[in-house]
Image (cartoon, helix red, strand yellow):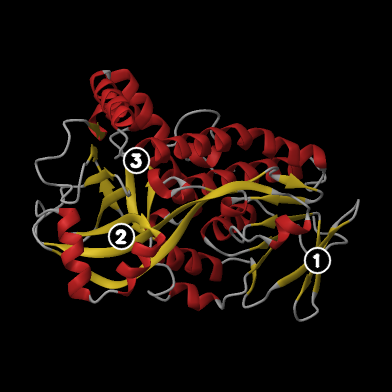
Amino acid sequence: MSGPHTHDVIIAGAGLAGATFALAAAQGGLKVALIDPQPFPAQLAPTFDGRSTAIAWSTFRMLDVLGLGERLRPHACRMDHILVTDGRRPGAASKAASPAFLRFDAEEVGDETGGEPLGYMVENRRIRAALAELLSGSDIELMAPASVVAVEASPSKATVTLVDGTVLTAPLVIGAEGRGSLVRASAGIETVGWPYGQSGVVATVRLDHDHGNVAHEYFLPQGPFAILPLTDRRASLVWTETTRAAEALRDASDEAFQSHLMRRFGDFLGTATPEGPRFVYPLALELATRLTGPRVALIGDAAHGVHPVAGQGLNMGLKDAAALAQVMIEAMRLGEDIGSETVLDRYARWRRFDIMALAAGFDAFVRLFSNDVAPVRLARDLGMAAVNRIAPLRRAFMGEAGGATGDLPRLLRGEPV
């Protein structure tokens, strides 16, 4: 289809969303260029990204179709239960926590999901390694390290200039470079949002006792504290603090970090021993005001940076990738111009409501839970108790978290495009 162009689609950013979209587009027959400023092997270093991701079971179906699933399953830990507790003080696991809690169990929705868990916890570095393996065996043109310095849209094509002077053209350019997206800026797309004044401290710990595939989320006055199950009796911690406290925790000695940790964690899983480096990620909400521009589409964090409270950031990005790939491939098969406004508008309409609803929901959630005002605490405790008692409501929450609601792209239904 390239014809007068060097490629059908040029993707800026080979992170998790960009690389997954590249695989989906290439499987559908598009000629793809994938550009990233980092040398690709650098993404595979254990120090590059210490996060772990909760992958919704519907998202995992997409990874299966793309060939990533089989590589990830040995490293994926089932989440069969999620316990959300409103904690008053450090020592979240101590018995003094409030009686308000939410409990989600995979068995409750087992009939609808075919026995799938609520989600799978996978370390980001494992996802990056699987992506790298599949990219190297594909005919995607991976250009890394290489940086996009300019993107220009004309009525018939987009022209991308790299820092070394290379010029590429395609009907469409995808911005997948995360929050500071150059593609987004070059299309004149603005963002709205605000910082939370908080940072997430991320660390992996080894546990004395088996976690039983339970994910715990405690809401402390400073912010959420999550203990997420990993394979091999380990857990990923996401510990929200003020940015100053978070940086102090990152830079503390192992002994000091562990003693702070045990005060928060309690001893219900025995001693939690930190393994590997600690990372600090500042938390902010940043939403692009539009998902598309002239010959440009945005996916992942370039389109929506949300609070990690519900662990849905990557799932949202992969949903973008699935929807956009389907729209592009269907348009190509019909002989349409895949970068035209008509085609891009289908993608924007498909994803806009879901993104806005989720972003607003997470923002409200953070505000509701990260404070210690008595009336707010009472209201949320009553709300949690109610959700717990109303089974259909609880199942609806689980369906939403599993990503299986609404008009799903084919990849998320486990079908190839």
Q: Residues within 10 Å of mark 1 (few under 14, many from 20)?
A: some
Label 2: state its secondary structure: helix
Residue placed furthest toward the right: 155
Write down the residue under mark 3: 371
Picture layout, residue 234 above or below residue 82? below
Which quarter of the rendering shows the C terminus?
top right
Identify whether 101 is placed above or below 218.
above
Q: What element does badge 1 sit on?
A: loop
Image quadrant holding the N terminus, namely bottom right
Quarter location, residue 364: top left
Three-letter amino acid code of the residue under disc 2: His
Q: Position of residue 279 (x, y in %)?
A: 37, 67
- For image coordinates 69% across by 55% down, the residue present is 174
Q: Which is nearer the eye, 17 or 408?
A: 17
Picture coordinates of residue 46, whole percent (x, y): 37, 74
Q: Amino acid at mark 3?
A: Asn
- CB atoms of marks 2 and 1 within 8 Å: no
Label 1 is placed on what type of residue? Thr
Give x and y (percent) for residue 194: 56, 48
Q: Position of residue 326 (x, y in %)?
A: 64, 42
Could you tell me which residue is drawn at 69 percent across and 73 percent down?
147
Residue hosting label 1: 6
User: Is 54 or 113 nearer to us in this picture?
Assistant: 54
Q: Please name the residue shown 61% across and 41% down the image.
A: 323
From the image, tell me which residue sits under label 2: 75
CA distance for labels 2 and 1: 37 Å
**In this view, 2 is above or below 378:** below
Q: Residues within 10 Å of mark 3 (few under 14, many from 20)?
A: some
Which of pointers 3 and 2 lies earlier in the amino acid sequence? 2
